[in-house]
Image: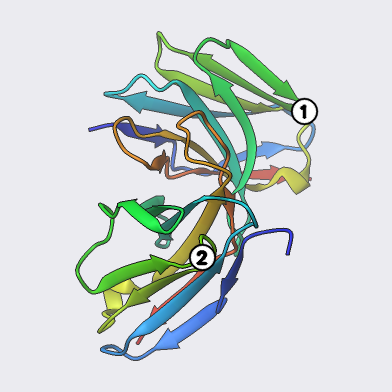
Amino acid sequence: SQKIEQNSEALNIQEGKTATLTCNYTNYSPAYLQWYRQDPGRGPVFLLLIRENEKEKRKERLKVTFDTTLKQSLFHITASQPADSATYLCATWSSGTYKYIFGTGTRLKVLA
Amino acid sequence: GAGVSQSPSNKVTEKGKDVELRCDPISGHTALYWYRQSLGQGLEFLIYFQGNSAPDKSGLPSDRFSAERTGGSVSTLTIQRTQQEDSAVYLCASSPKADRGGSPLHFGNGTRLTVT
């Protein structure tokens, strides 16, 4: 079955460093991937979308890549700040259905 | 309002009782989704609405779960005879359309349901 996988272990990094989060997909060739941010007690908030024909997409300090050979998307936050601490989710449309499927998310903690 | 609104934000109920969870999507959004998020788990799809119809109910865990949408706007998720395993955060999201083209989902902050 189609699956999106993210590293469920928390990622701790020092303020100012670049955080890199990974999203892998199996049994599927999605036309795009979306990234969301979720803070405790809140719903996910959309950040970026990257399509399969785009190698890279940027928005301020955020950068997303899409490697269809590796079946992987990387999400980078440069010059990370404690305010970037949150759980980050990747998602895509499930082929043949009407639903988005989500990874389990990776919790990022930026240490001051 | 500007965003998706869900009520109540918290609900504690006794096992066996029925509960109703409400979602007010962003005005004009025709697509509406319900997801469930258990502690430490990902988002589990429950049901999708396009307008008032539900073309995909494949995620509803059992016949105790039902949902409706009226006027192409407000949606209600009903859980009958609640069980402890129903405890979770129920999230509603809306989108301008379900075009498989990547329209982002706009989520509410969820209803935290606790079944005692």
Name the residue type under label 1.
Arg
Quickly name the residue at label 2: B71
Circle 1 residues within 10 Å: few <14, some 14–19, many ≥20:
few
Residue placed under numbered mark 1 in the picture: A61
Apparent side of residue A29 relative to residue B113 in the rendered image (left or right): left
Examine the rendering and report whether any part of residue A109 can be seen. Answer: yes
Is label 2 in contact with label 1 (beta carbons under 8 Å)? no
Q: Amino acid at mark 2?
A: Gly
The chain ID associated with circle 1 is A
The local secondary structure at tag 1 comes to: loop
Vertical order, B17 against A103 (above or below): below
At horizontal 28% and vertical 55% (from top left) the residue drawn is B57
**Side (left or right) of B41 relative to B109:** left
| The residue positioned farthest toward the left in the image shown | B63
Examine the image and state in which quarter residue B18 appears. Answer: bottom left
Please tell me whether residue A55 is drawn above or below residue B34 in the rendered image. above
Count of marks placed on residues: 2
Q: Quadrant of the N terminus of chain A?
A: top left
Give the residue displayed 76% in from the left and 35% down from the top. Answer: A80
Expressed as whole percent of the image width and height from the top left, the position of residue A25 reads 37, 26
- Residue toward you, B52 or A51: B52
